[in-house]
Image: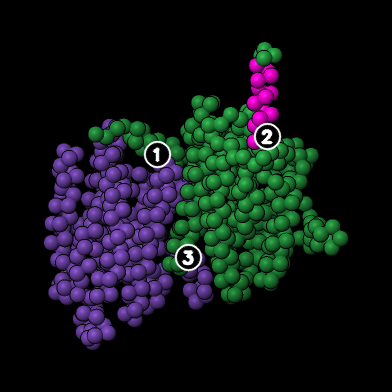
Amino acid sequence: MTNLQNAAEEEQLAHFMQRIERGDKIEADDWMPEEYRLTLIRLISMHGISEIMGALPEKEWVPKAPSLNRKLGIMAKVQDEMGHGQLLLRVTEDLLVPYGKNRGDIMQDLFNGDLKFHNVFHMETKTWADAGIIGWLVDGAAIITQTNMLGASYGPYARALQRICAEEVFHAQHGESIIMALAEGTDEQKAMIQESLNRWWEALLMFFGPASKETTGSSKQDLTIKYKIRTKTNEEFRQLFFDKYIPRILSLGLTIPDPTIRFDEESKLWSYKQPDWNEFKKIIKNGGPRSHARLNLRRSSYENNAWVRDALSVKVT
Amino acid sequence: MNENETVMSQEYKEAITSLLFQLADDDFLYAYRGSEWLGLAPHIEEDVASSSISQDSMGHAAMFYKLLEDLGVGNADDLAHSRPALDRKNSVLMERVNGEGYYMETPLYDWAYQVVRSYFYTQAKKIKIDSLCESSYSPLADTAVKVRMELYYHRLHWETWFKQLLSSTDVAKKKMDEAIKKVMDDFGDVFSYGNEKLLIEKSRLISSEESLRDKWNASIEPVFAALQMEVPKISDKPTKNGRNGEHTQDLVEALHTLSEVYKFDPIATW
């Protein structure tokens, strides 16, 4: 690169950062530094594919939902998640244009392990209470991280999140309604929620990611904050989750499966037992309890339907 | 007739009950099979669209079960979840599995079968619903008017798929031809009222079996003609008639899955 090109690029970058600083929205066709583009692709493709992979654990309970209304509710909920996946993959596809990549490449990246999906969706579901806990607490956790990005510097993502967050609020209510019915039900139903909470607790703490990159060797939170995609750190998110949900969990007569958890009045922070971050690393590298089964399900259905996609590429007169 | 205006004869009530079970069980099983496809459709946009159709259909089933509840036949959730296969009145076509494998493992579902079953069924449902809009039982006629609004989009959706897949690759055409044959093997009871035929037809709740069947043929004839295909013949002697409680193992297994949580404690509130 010549000095002239270098200077031009530096000027572009300075101009870009000024736009970010003053709160401009960056659009798909605007100039952006490659680091910004790659950060967005990593973040949004992971978010999108997590919505799609996240449909699989919940979908296990759709046919089994125990009443007509619950069947209708959970069908709508899982459909929304697929819809979020669709919106987010469309946003990612636009960002991928300069690399000549498309949705097929996103799917291949998922299958070969280059594209990760959220740790929670690698976990097993065992009872109907899991359908409630996923809606109430997993979607509740997602609302905390996603509403923080409603003002994201990248316009298409911020706009997609407007709709996604509005629907996630319904999901959390849907989950809460399942949990409330169980909490007011028989002893077996109550025991079902506690057992489910015990199994999901660690995965819920992991959902927000490690506090710093020292924990797991990598974290993109610094970059996303630098580019004003989000404003809070992983640990701040986790603390907000505790603030919001610990009182609600306790009010249902449930026990937090961490005897050490307590609120420090002085620092105004919760201290708690750290989840096993080595296990987290293993899970997000597709080494979780259901990682292979779910990837296999998505891969096999994708391959099984390849003939349909071929048939759609033929123009019908 | 409206139950508030006239005291219903026992015979009339039997006819309505029988017809409502057929309608409710058809949509309930159809929506259930659709829900097994969640997350596995050929592309993400289709997943969203067909899931919406499954939800609407589950909603229609819920409305028909509610009409039964209003007649004092039982609680809608119980009717949907607790009746054994022998008591079910759905067409055998609705209970058939989507393809190989169980939805909780790694199933290999057949999209051609999904398209053909959905298109033929939706077209049949439209013919029935049009007739039900004129039903002598006004709560059923009112429900039919609501269902008809959504059905318009369902029919359009599946017809688009049907035409596209039959006009594209050789592989798709072959799969669709096989699916048409498979669906037609089970289509014989779709327009049947089973043993209640005389009772239902004379109660002016809905048109006769023969009239609906003719309308179905006439309604899809232009689509087949455009594809240079002949409308397949509906058998009037089905090997199994679901309207009389004749079913397959597929239904027994489906009922086991869909009522698993409900049966954990049928008295509890879920």
Q: Earlier in the sequence, mark 3 or mark 1?
A: 3
Residue where numbered disc 2 is placed: A18
Is residue A7 shown in magenta? Answer: yes
Which of the chains bears the disc numbered 2?
A: A
The vertical placement of B245 against B235, above or below, is below
**Element type where label 1 sits in the image:** loop
Q: How many marks?
A: 3
- Determine the image quadrant of residue B31: bottom left
Q: Secondary structure at mark 3?
A: helix
Q: Earlier in the sequence, mark 2 or mark 3?
A: 2
- Residue A317 on image: x %, y %: 24, 34
x, y percent for residue B85: 34, 66
Q: Which chain is green?
A: A
Above or below for A101 versus B225: above
Residue under the point 48% across and 35% down: A103
* Residue bearing the label numbered 3: A70
Q: Amino acid at mark 3?
A: Arg
Q: Position of residue B36 (x, y in %)?
A: 42, 53
Would you identify the image quadrant in which residue A195 lies? bottom right
The magenta-colored residue range is A5-19
Q: Are dots 2 and 1 in contact, CB under 8 Å?
A: no
Q: Secondary structure at mark 2?
A: helix
Instruction: Assign the N terminus of chain A to one quadrant of the image.
Output: top right
Which residue corresponds to mark 1? A305
Three-letter amino acid code of the residue under disc 1: Asn
Disc nearest the viewer among 2 and 3? 2
Q: Colour of chain B?
A: purple
Q: Answer whether residue B155 is magenta in the image.
A: no
Q: Are marks 3 and 1 in contact (CB under 8 Å)?
A: no
Please rate how many residues cluster around mark 2, counting C-alpha atoms within 10 Å: few if below 14, some from 14 to 19, many from 20: few
